[in-house]
Image: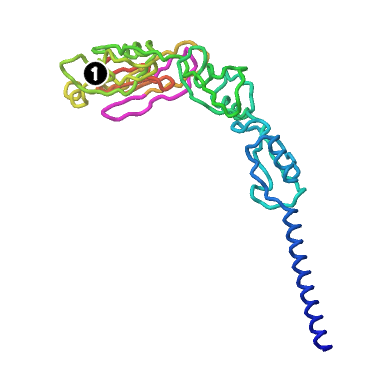
Amino acid sequence: MILKIIRMGFFFLAAFFVAGISTYLMLTALIKSEETVIVPNLVGKSLVNTLEVLSQLELNIKVAKSEYNRTTPPHHVLFQDPPPGQEIKKGRDVRLILSKGTEFINMPDLRHLSIQQARIILEENDLSMGANTFVFSAGLPKDEVLAHTPEPGAVTHASAPVNLLISTGPRPNFYKVPDLSDVSLDEAVHKIGKMGLRIGEIKSVYKPDQPLHTIISQEPSPGYRIQKGAALDLTINRQTAEARRQNQDLAAGPRLFRYRLTEGFMKKRIRIRVTCYGYSMDFYDELVVPGTEIWSLVPRHARAEVVLYQNNELIKSEGSDS
């Protein structure tokens, strides 16, 4: 009997212990579930709406900072921490970054600046390069800004494109290529220089039916539209060495070549080149004071050609029989 009572007492004690443990675990789970909440998605919501949502969840709001943003209105959430879906305890802080909306900027004045300077200023003011339009301008050198949109002082937003009107410099002068047929090389040099053009490559051919030492062809052709400073290639009628040897004897001794520099202030490099029977050599190459007269002895060969360059520009050309 006593043993039976003991067994029954032990059974009731064990049942009471198991019930207590179960009750404790259930109460602990209920209490724990009440102390944590799931963080909602607050990005894009207004500050008032966010404050209302977090208050209902017994969470605190903490604004870390505000940033400019073109796509999000002012006082709306750009970023949150903890992120949406995370479980946290009640009473914890939710860190927010809010939008200040679009940043507005007073357009700087880029006129009379180079493209490089304008690009730097745009980057410093959080603006971007838009479309560039290029036009001739007599007043501004090449690659300087004539105008732009938005205009100087106008209110615009950050990252807005700025369109530039850029100078390509003065409009180039074009000339009609003159007809230099049957003109001597010296006269051709004078005409070409007077027009602001320059001599390019000079070739020689022999045509017995045309005057010697005259232009028989040119490139570009007469009447062609050419820009100032461009070069003209010339072909001159000159006898070949074989023809000269057949028709003339070699003259004995050298001959005197003379040239006087124009007056001025700066020295000029003078180079005298002699070509004879297909060979060329410089007889004279020095810096010369303006106004000086140069005397140089050159071969008196029937085929000798003497050419004088001033600062690498062709000035004078002579054949031995000229």
Q: Is the magenta stretch mostly helix, strand or loop?
A: strand
Counting other residues with Cα less than 10 Å from the Cα at mark 1, is it few (<14), some (14-19), or many (20 or more)? some
Give residue 45's quadrant in the image.
top right
* Left-right relation of 97 to 217: right
Range drawn in magenta:
273-295
Question: Where 311 sits versus 32, above or below?
Answer: above
Towards the viewer: 167 or 70: 70
**In the rendered structure, does residue 118 fall within the stretch colored magenta?**
no
Quadrant of the frame with the N terminus: bottom right
Towards the viewer: 173 or 302: 173
* Left-right relation of 90 to 299: right
* Left-right relation of 73 to 186: right
Q: Which residue is drawn at 27% across and 12% down?
A: 223
Q: Which kind of residue does numbered mark 1 sit on?
A: Ser
**In the rendered structure, does residue 286 fall within the stretch colored magenta?**
yes
Which residue extends farthest front?
1
Q: Residue at x 76, y 43 (%)?
A: 60
- For label 1, the residue is 217
Question: Where 301 sits versus 59, above or below?
Answer: above
> What color scheme is it?
rainbow
Q: Which residue is drawn at 35% across and 29% down?
A: 281
Towards the viewer: 322 or 74: 74
